[in-house]
Image (spheres, coloured by chain):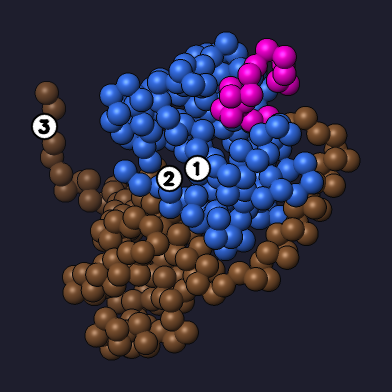
Amino acid sequence: MIVIDLVSGLSKEIEITLVNNLDYKSITKSRFWFDWKQEKDYNVFKLCLKGTDDILGLVSLDIFTKESRIEIRLLAVSKENRGKAKLLDLIAGNLIAFACIESIKKFGEMACVSLVPKTDLIQYYMDEYGMLQAGKSLFIDGNELLQLIKKYDHD
Amino acid sequence: MINKENKSLEDFKYLIDSRDLTNKEKAEERDTILKARAARFETRSDNDIKTAKLMQLKFQMEEYLSSPLCSVELSFPKFLMTYIDTLYEKRKDFASDISIKPIVLSHVLNEHREPNDSFLLRLMFHSQDSFKDLIEFDKSLWAMVYYQDKVCGFLDSSEKLGKSEKKHVRGINF
């Protein structure tokens, strides 16, 4: 998986791994918006450039095994990589695709990922990630989920 | 929770918070999503199901190789069985496609025989074709899984045999 350095235009390899207890010291609210310590009971993953330990994005996943579904509870891109002046692109997309990979790894053809978006961004997530609306939630499964993985799972 | 007044809409594209629902709302959402998915699943093609199963296999193989834990159970025959059963109705058809006897394949799947180099190479070429239009697949994953099984097996037996073998060794202390 890769992100794009918007200054140089070059792609950079990333890795997404489980957050450990020591990481929480460097995960501040000012850089990652939420209080991530509240997520310790869930599956929290960090995105870093390969071979570095600077965290650029975080995602917290809740796994509903009986429903073959993973919910993105929380996701945050680091402050310097948000908005129009961001330095690196594709961090959020990689974290969403990672949730899809975890779901397909566990549930195969039944895999599904859901999230609850801000109302104003429903259309954005549908256009950008191929998600579908169900109530207040958005979800992705089937061919759309496979396509999203294909889009992001490459070096 | 997100302070909506302090953030622009653009910033929220990089922040997701799904926690702000009551238990009642969560239950309603779960039912709505399940209903929507069930309707979609009925129209899913066999090809999409096969693709999903092959992707699952690839990611499970990658996870097995990146895990620091060794399992006593062999993973190679298990992954191979999933691969064949996803693509073929009859295993003998796979045997035919890689030009080996069905009995040889059966022995490998049932752990009565080790796959030789030819078997591994043919399997690698076969999977290269199967995954070509689906997703990036490193065909050497098969060899890596096979040898990871061997390493795990050796480490398991060395635990048991270690003491009896150690008495035959005289080391050098610095």
Depth check, mark 2 against mark 3: the one in front is: 2
Residue B36: horizontal and vertical position, in percent? Answer: 74, 58
Camera-near label (1 vs 3) is 1
Q: Which mark is residue B125?
A: none
Q: Residue at x 11, y 23 (%)?
A: B174
Q: CA distance from mark 2 to mark 3?
A: 52 Å
Distance CA(mark 1)–CA(mark 2): 9 Å
Q: Nearer the viewer, mark 1 or mark 2?
A: 2
Subunit ID for the residue under disc 3: B
Q: Is A147 on the left or on the right of A74, as rendered?
A: left
Q: Nearer the viewer, residue A95 or B144?
A: A95
**Looking at the image, residue B67 lies above or below residue B52:** above
Tags 1 and 2 touching, CB below 8 Å: yes
Q: Position of residue A153 (x, y in %)?
A: 40, 47
Q: Measured from the top left, where is residue B50 in percent x and y?
A: 49, 70
Residue at image mark 2: A152
Q: CA distance from mark 1 to mark 3?
A: 49 Å
Q: Amino acid at mark 3?
A: Ile
Determine which residue is flagged by label 3.
B172
Tag 2: Cα neighbours inside 10 Å, few (<14), some, or many (≥20)?
some
